[in-house]
Image (cartoon, rainbow, N blue to C red):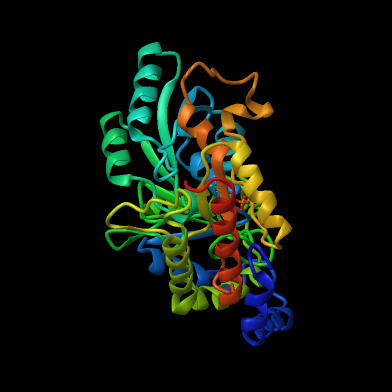
Amino acid sequence: MEFINLKGQYLCLKEDIDRAISEVLLQSNFIMGPQVMELEEKLASYVGRKYCITCGNGTDALVLSLLAHGIGEGDVVFLPTFTYFATGEAVSRVGAKPVFVDSDLETYNIDTDDMALAIEEVVRKGENTPKAVIAVDLFGLPANYPEICKIANKYGLLVIEDGAQGFGGTIEGKKACSFGDISTTSFFPAKPLGCYGDGGAIFTDDKDIKDILESLRVHGKGENKYDNVRIGMNSRLDTIQAAILLVKLKAFQEYELAKRQEIAEWYNKELNEMVDIPDIPKGYTSSYAQYTIQLPDSSRRDKTANYLKERGVPTAIYYKKCLHQQEAYMDMIDVSRNLGKAEKMAGGVLSLPMSAYIENNELQDITVAIKNFVINTYNSK
Ligand SMILES: *Cc1c(COP(=O)(O)O)cnc(C)c1O
């Protein structure tokens, strides 16, 4: 059994993907071929933003977004501590200071009360300028943007949506990667919409920001890439990856997203009595980048994972450490804030196999194994 069945997806889409790749090989326009522009139009229209700017990966998408808004030295950016390292790394990479915020135990996303406290604290100290919030759509569920934007507005902060895992999720029918001022996503193969290597994209409604981003991703180009008007990066999406994504986006829209929901519903129904299942607030949908359950503590989590492994069920732990617990941040940040809920989650989370290509018998095996383990070992949640 695969944790994410990428091979099953390829075999299903093989004919179209092989054709798309060989078209690029025959055209030999490997950088910024027409498939890149076609994909950008389709992605922008899918998420409901005016502009999409593709780039090299989801981390660069965050770095480029911060650069485009002039965020750097002396600025503070607030973000959840329970996220993938790249969210914080992008902030540090541009020279700004990350301030880590606790997460909500039900949704796994940024705790908005703690976010307000963290902002107040930075304002009170007055050493650095609060500039932006990066909210993360963890495991596929959009963060609480109505509340995040309200708080950010009060303090004049930019809202960046890290939609690396959120692509496909919604709030009241509005799609992920359209929330806040600017949104980013990743096409890393394991994400809800993945390519066959690294890839990423940025979404904005602001024409000036779009122009700056198009310059930044090609060495700060002006008229052309030999006319350089700012310090940029080299971060473009390969034409081959764009061609693959055009095929995969179609499958994602036509059936994959719906299939992921179906699988999550099956898990919900079968596991509800046994373990803490993901909590999707009313009006929200998740693209289930991960289907993540919570066990009461790390010993129980690790025992569950081992039991499943012995029965051929792969699982993963996203994330064993919060950002404030990472060695890279040890000497750089003030860890005096209480981030206890995020720490508890890091101890208890366990992600189960998820993709649109899981077979029914595999689902059966997974849920039976979890039930047997819980009933035999603990008798309850
Ligand atoms: C994957 C991921 C990223 C980074 O994307 P890459 O394409 O791997 O650089 C950023 N933020 C989150 C939340 C992610 O899951």
Query: What x and y, as percent, mark residue 315?
Result: 64, 55
Against 361, residue 354 (above or below) is: above
Q: Is residue 231 left or right of residue 150?
A: right
> Which residue is depicted at the point 52% across and 71% down?
39
Please indicate whether residue 155 sits to the left or right of residue 212 in the image.
left
* Placement of the N terminus among the 4 image quadrants: bottom right
Residue 231 visible, this orientation: no
- State the residue at coordinates (65%, 18%): 331
Q: Nearer the viewer, residue 49 or 109?
A: 109
Residue 196 visible to the viewer: yes
Residue 216 picture location, percent across and down: 56, 48
* Residue found at x 56% / y 74%: 248
Name the spot of residue 190 as percent of width and height, x first: 62, 60
Eyeballing the image, is 287 above or below 84? below
Residue 140, compared with residue 7, is above or below; it is above
Identify the residue at image location x=68%, y=27%. 327
Q: In this rendered view, identify the residue nearer to me: 101 or 347.
A: 347
Q: Position of residue 119 (x, y in %)?
A: 37, 24
Q: How many marks?
A: 0
Residue 113 lies left or right of residue 69; in this view the side is left
